[in-house]
Image (cartoon, rainbow, N blue to C red):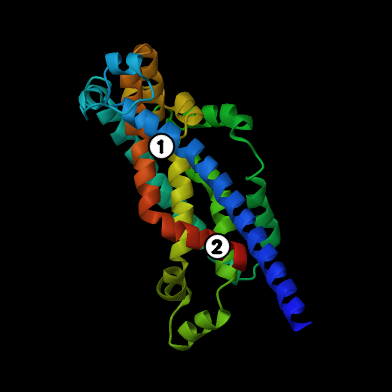
């Protein structure tokens, strides 16, 4: 009986291991397929930026024979991507800083303080998550025109900050609520006022959440198309997305140049994510657990 029992246990253990192996294999297979479908277009686009028309026509999916930056140089100079990139930076950096700063302050207030109409104001901000930009773009156009901001950087920066606030406040207050109240109390006992508690004690602990919010806002602002198309009607203020549209219209038949323009436009996003990916994932995980 002992031998039979051991054999049954061995067969059962083998079936469990085989089942686990099949599940793991299926998971890795699905992830590998998703990875290939995600990365392959990016590699194809970036490699095409280093290929001539002849190479692309001969074999569009082949890797370039040599890394010649001719297309990138042409797109950067003749295509004016040097100017478009500066405009995108001038628009994106103040927008990200404004959203992060204001969302942190408002999120801290909603999470840690009691005041009249707290829930009402908070839900009013959350309504902003449900209001599409298309429903307010025409009234906003006339408001910016009346204030004399139309066709300036502020016509993009100020609305982008306002549109980014609802999500930022929601994310930051969820993170602040997960921090122990004793941390604030210890700072007050040591003589800190409310802003010093926020700045020196609470804010340094929210680096993951701030990084997540900064990445989200950077991507949204950098990729914004409809807003600059409507409000930035001068060529000298065009960001990267608008510049890429006009560049593509001018060089429709040259896939190498178009790929170079897309490479220049997407490269900063990839770099930012690679540099902050750990903080980004920590922020999302912490928000999911503590929110």
Above/below status of 140 relative to 106: above
Q: Note whether residue 189 is visible.
A: yes
Question: Element type at marker 2?
Answer: helix
The residue at 64%/70% (across/down) is 114
Report crowding for label 2: few under 14, some 14 to 19, many 20 or more residues within 10 A (C-alpha).
some
Rendering coords of residue 13 (x, y %): 68, 69
Asked whether 52 or 80 is in front, the reply is 52
Above/below status of 12 relative to 245: below
Residue at label 1? 154
Asked whether 171 or 157 is in front, the reply is 171
Rendering coords of residue 14 (x, y %): 66, 66
Question: Element type at marker 1?
Answer: helix
Mark 1–mark 2 Cα distance, whole angstroms, equals 34 Å
Res 68 quadrant in image: top left
Residue at label 2? 285
Task: Report the quarter where the N terminus lies.
Answer: bottom right
């Amino acid at each position: 009986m002992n031998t039979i029992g051991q054999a049954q246990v061995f067969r059962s253990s083998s079936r469990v291991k085989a089942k686990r192996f099949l599940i793991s294999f299926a998971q890795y297979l699905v992830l590998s397929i998703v990875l290939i479908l995600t990365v392959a277009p990016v590699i194809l686009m970036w490699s095409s930026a280093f290929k001539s028309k002849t190479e692309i026509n001969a074999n569009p999916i082949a890797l370039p024979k040599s890394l010649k930056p001719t297309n990138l140089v042409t797109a950067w100079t003749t295509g004016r991507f040097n100017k478009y990139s500066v405009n995108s930076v001038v628009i994106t950096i103040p927008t990200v800083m404004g959203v992060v700063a204001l969302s942190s302050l408002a999120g801290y207030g909603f999470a840690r303080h009691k005041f009249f109409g707290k829930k009402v104001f908070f839900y009013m901000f959350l309504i902003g998550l449900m209001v599409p930009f298309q429903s307010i773009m025409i009234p906003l156009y006339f408001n910016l025109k009346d204030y004399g901001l139309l066709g300036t950087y502020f016509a993009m920066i100020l609305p982008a900050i306002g549109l980014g606030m609802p999500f930022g406040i929601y994310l930051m207050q969820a993170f602040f609520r997960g921090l122990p109240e004793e941390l604030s109390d210890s700072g007050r006992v040591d003589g800190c006022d409310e802003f010093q508690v926020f700045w020196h004690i609470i804010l340094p602990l929210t680096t993951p959440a701030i990084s997540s919010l900064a990445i989200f806002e950077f991507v949204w602002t950098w990729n914004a198309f409809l807003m600059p198309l409507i409000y930035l009607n001068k060529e000298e203020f065009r960001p990267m997305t608008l510049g890429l549209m006009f560049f593509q219209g001018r060089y429709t038949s040259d896939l190498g140049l178009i790929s170079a323009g897309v490479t220049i436009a997407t490269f900063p996003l990839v770099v930012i994510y690679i540099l902050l990916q750990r903080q980004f994932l920590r922020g999302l995980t912490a928000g999911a657990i503590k929110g």
